Amino acid sequence: MKKGNLLELQAAVAVATHRSFRRAAVDVGLSPSALSHAVNALEARLGVRLFHRTTRSVSLSEAGERFLAAMEPALAALSEAMASVNDFKAGPSGTLRLNAAEGAVRLLLEPLLLEYLRRYPEMRLDIVTEGRLVDIVAEGFDVGVRLADLVPQDMIAVPCGPEMRFALVASPSFLARHGEPDSPADLARFNCIQPRLASGALYRWEFCDPRGEPLRFAPMGNLMLDSHTLTIEAAVQGVGLAWLSRPQVSRELAQGLLVEVLPQWAPTYPRLCLYYPGHRLVPPGLMALVELARELYPA
């Protein structure tokens, strides 16, 4: 098969997967115009239209559905065969696409992800942070990072961080002005930085009393944020109390910029995990990241 023909097929599969020329171009590693040219060339070669295009949407034609259904397994097998020969190189190379929540990347950036790039300089990490859970296969990612209990059951999960414990924190200046709460019941009289989930809903803080009973609290305050980084900054500036995972604020706690309150009410959560589909051949670049995670975070 000519190289150009293979590229045209890969371009068509990517467009069919993402239903977007722009996202498909990122997946294949082409410019949008080059990818569009490759799809047009394939359609001209076949003499049929594979996609219906408008300015707002892309969909498969009937001929496109039949053709891609037949071609996708063959292309997947070919890609796996090509990836397998990387084992004979000095080290893995290529691009690894990773999807994770912002807080997870902040926690793992230095100990795991930057160490990975130092060990494997021929690899590139393309990291996308977002709060919403995504189908990493459908969205074109090689690996995801989430709390263990959020990992889909059909994925292979590898622990990649410490046990997660949340912390209620505030700046020393805020506590000097307002005092400290004695229990979660006292929080109604404090200004709280309200976290907003990716869905748009406001997150309810989840405590655990000394007997182990869960307790949920709807914080009230004059600032709502959907970013952990901005929440930390606002808390450091004395805006109010914030509810964050302790590893996320370990630096600020160590420097005295934030103080933890009500630690006896803080619950623990499952560890973060790398996860990836188990029904595919694992490329060397991903396997190297998995092995590094197992080295740094033994079970």
Image (cartoon, rainbow, N blue to C red):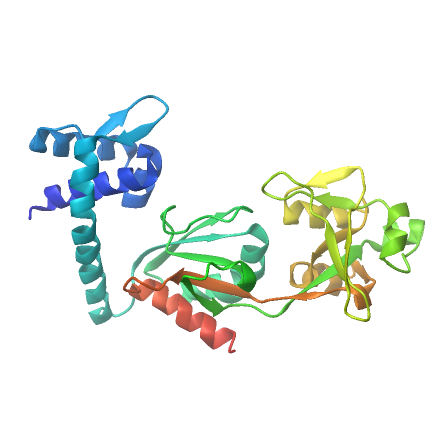
Give the residue displayed 25% in from the left and 30% down from the top. 33
Q: Position of residue 146 (x, y in %)?
A: 52, 58
Tally of marks: 0
Q: Is residue 50 above or below residue 67?
A: above
- Image: 90 above or below 3: below
Residue 104: give x, y in percent of width and height.
56, 57
Q: Nearer the viewer, residue 72 or 170?
A: 72
Q: Is residue 222 left or right of residue 102?
A: right
Q: Residue 67, percent across and down?
A: 16, 40
Q: Nearer the viewer, residue 122 or 269?
A: 269
At 68% from the left and 41% from the top, the residue drawn is 225
Residue in the image at 43% along x and 71% along y = 292
> Residue 64, relative to residue 273: is it above or below?
above
Does the image show residue 255?
Answer: no
Tell me: 176 left or right of 169: right
Residue 286 visible to an observer of this rendering: yes
Q: Quadrant of residue 197?
A: top right
Residue at the (64%, 48%) spot, across then down: 229
Q: Is 100 placed left or right of 86 in the picture?
A: right
Picture coordinates of residue 191 (x, y %)? Answer: 84, 44
Farthest top residue in view: 55
